[in-house]
Image: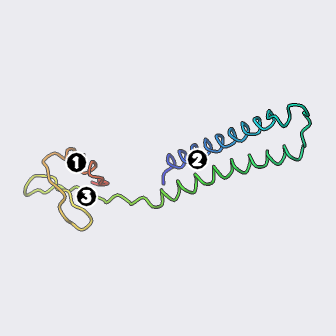
Amino acid sequence: MNVIRRLKIDLESRNRQLAAMDQGIQDLESYLWSTKFAEDTKVQVADVLLRLREIQNAAANAQVDYENEAYAAERNRAPKPAAYLMFDEDIREYIAVDGKNDILGQSSQRDALAKMLKRQGYRVQA
């Protein structure tokens, strides 16, 4: 996995962590504004601290869950097959073969052949 993919996963996991924290804070605010505290505005510190701990745990879980899913998906990605381009002097054309030397295509234009192979999902190597 390259650096860009890792950074994208890291960014998305942090966004999910922030979203979970935001949701938890909104829930805490709703709780503090509830009718329970309409007349008696006293709040138990332990109750608020417990809810803050729940917010922290939910945020950490959201981040870790996403990272685990994303990294598992990266590990399960099938590697793209390789295609090798060679110039055949006899027929004066480029030939593309795979790792088993099966011919994938041929063309007099190298770039056109490479583009066609990339569209088919091959990693093109000269």
Q: What residue is shown with label 1? A: 116
Residue 26 horizontal side relative to residue 16, left or right: right
Determine the CA span between mark 2 and mark 1.
Answer: 33 Å
- Residue sitting at 13 percent across and 57 percent down? 88
Q: Which mark is residue 10?
A: 2
Residue 69 horizontal side relative to residue 126, left or right: right
* Residue 8 at x, y percent in the picture: 53, 44
Closest to the observer: 75 or 29?
29
Determine the CA span between mark 2 and mark 3.
Answer: 34 Å
Mark 3: few/some/many CA within 10 Å (<14, 14-19, 20+):
many
- Residue sitting at 24 percent across and 68 percent down? 100
Residue 67 horizontal side relative to residue 57, left or right: left
Task: Please state which amino acid type lies under the numbered disc 3.
Answer: Tyr
Q: Residue furthest bottom?
A: 100
Q: Nearer the viewer, mark 3 or mark 1?
A: 1
Comes first in the chain, label 3 or label 1: 3
* Residue 119 at x, y percent in the picture: 27, 48
- Depicted 29 relative to depicted 99: above or below: above
Q: What residue is shown with label 3? A: 84
Determine the CA span between mark 3 and mark 1.
Answer: 13 Å
Comes first in the chain, label 2 or label 1: 2
- Residue sitting at 85 percent across and 31 percent down? 38
Task: Please state which amino acid type lies under the numbered disc 2.
Answer: Asp
Comes first in the chain, label 2 or label 3: 2
Looking at the rendered structure, the secondary structure element under dot 3 is strand
Q: Nearer the viewer, mark 2 or mark 1?
A: 2
Mark 2: few/some/many CA within 10 Å (<14, 14-19, 20+):
some
Task: Assess whether mark 1 and mark 3 are in contact (beta carbons under 8 angstroms).
Answer: no
Mark 1: few/some/many CA within 10 Å (<14, 14-19, 20+):
few
